[in-house]
Amino acid sequence: MTIASTTAPENAGELEPHHAAVVRDTLPVIAARIDEITTAFYRRMFAAHPELLRDRFNRGNQAQGAQQRALAASIATFATHLVDPDLPHPRELLSRIGHKHASLGVVAEEYPIVHEHLFAAIVEVLGAGVVTGEVAAAWDRVYWLMADALIALERELYAEAGVEPGDVFRETTVVERIEDSSGVVGFVIESADPTRPLPEFVPGQYISVGATLPDGARQLRQYSLINEPGDGRLAFAVRRVRGDGAHPDGEVSTWLHENIRAGDRLQVTIPFGDLTIDTATTTPLVLISAGIGVTPMIGILDHLASHSSRRRVLVLHADRSEHTHPLRQVQQGLVEQLPHAEMEVWYEQPSPSAHPGTLGISRLDLPPDADFYLCGGTGFLQSVRAQLRAAGIADGRVHFELFAPNDWLLDQ
């Protein structure tokens, strides 16, 4: 069954006036110390439930503080909207969180666990003198309005996928490993159980891949699907994350590169993700990516090429060089199959086949009625969104994906 592109509801509930007044008055003090609050929250929750850090949460993001900042920002953003409904609704933020949660198998019963340790952390950091009964009640209402919106979205996602809540993990067999000249490795998988084939998906979606590491932890990471739906197989590409002095090597990407070959088993989830195209329309598309952010664009291009699409497609990609450009030949080949597609590339290192430097759109003829799809690092997406706004492109036509917990920055 194909998973539809479900989004967060327009109205996620409203604060009662007396709660809104309290939240408005206390939002500055909460916001000023919310990084401390979320740090204390994760410390408390993982002490009580170590299996969540071992088997669910990204340990690398936790170590770097990225997940803590993401939680803090999402709560603050949601609370700010509740007390000022004239601000843009955070539906896109909620939608990305909901799809991510569904891809991890999050269920409604886990939200009280978060609530318990989050509110204990608030009291720990701010003190009982600040967190009075009135303040606690108001922020409790904020939490459950946000949680209920996410629970409803996740319940709908599971229903559309035809599965019980949380029943998203599947055992698969790797049928092919593909070495790309950029160093990226592609994996093609199929169900290990012929009676339970892998589901259909929408171009642009992703799966979570589970890696059981040497210490026994099962870590999960998301990877975009790069193949055309329909043959019961899923394909994804992995760039090995190499560490530096401040950050270690990526745990899951290293494990996949070093250990997984054709014939091996992999545990993955069914597809989710809301960076998807409307396959029924014929309006132009502009696909903008940097680095490994090319992968959802490959999946979209593969779909368009497989269906002999006559849509106008403008493909823009930025990278360090042609040697680091993931799936470059695949991307070029798909563009060449589309009669109304063109591709522009920017490389930081000089190349006769690309524009020099960073991606810029000021001299491009952008279709005014196009939908724009972006995927790349935080700085890249912030730069491109600013350029698109300067070019008069409405935010509603711009869709983006960032597989990092700081994707909330893109809503600023």
Image (spheres, rainbow, N blue to C red):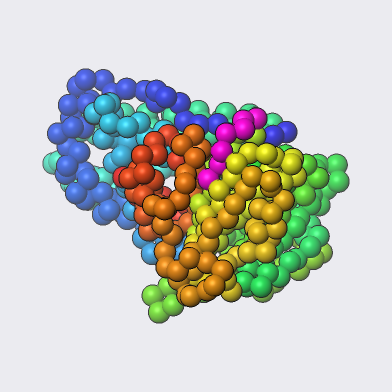
Looking at the picture, tell me which residue is in the foreground, 26 or 43: 26
Looking at the picture, tell me which residue is in the foreground, 217 or 403: 403
Q: Residue at x 18, y 32 (%)?
A: 24
Q: Position of residue 285 (x, y in %)?
A: 56, 41
How many callouts does the rendering have?
0
Residue 274 versus residue 376 in the image, above or below: above
Left or right position of 383 against 166? left
Q: Quadrant of residue 282?
A: top right
Left or right position of 402 against 180? left
Spot the residue most to the bottom.
245
Quadrant containing the N terminus in the rendered view: top right
Q: Position of residue 131 (x, y in %)?
A: 19, 39
Spot the residue most to the top.
17
* Residue 347 drawn in magenta: no
Spot the residue most to the right.
194
Q: Residue at x 44, y 29 (%)?
A: 149
Q: Quadrant of residue 128?
A: top left
Quadrant containing the C terminus in the rendered view: top left
Looking at the picture, tell me which residue is in the foreground, 113 or 279: 279
- Can residue 102 be spotted in the picture? no
Q: Position of residue 98 (x, y in %)?
A: 50, 38
* Residue 282 drawn in magenta: yes
- Can residue 32 be spotted in the picture? yes
Q: Position of residue 226 (x, y in %)?
A: 67, 53
Q: Quadrant of residue 203?
A: top right
Main secondary structure along the magenta-highlighted residues: loop
Q: Residue at x 26, y 45 (%)?
A: 122
Q: Residue at x 40, y 79 (%)?
A: 245
Q: Which residues are magenta?
A: 280-286
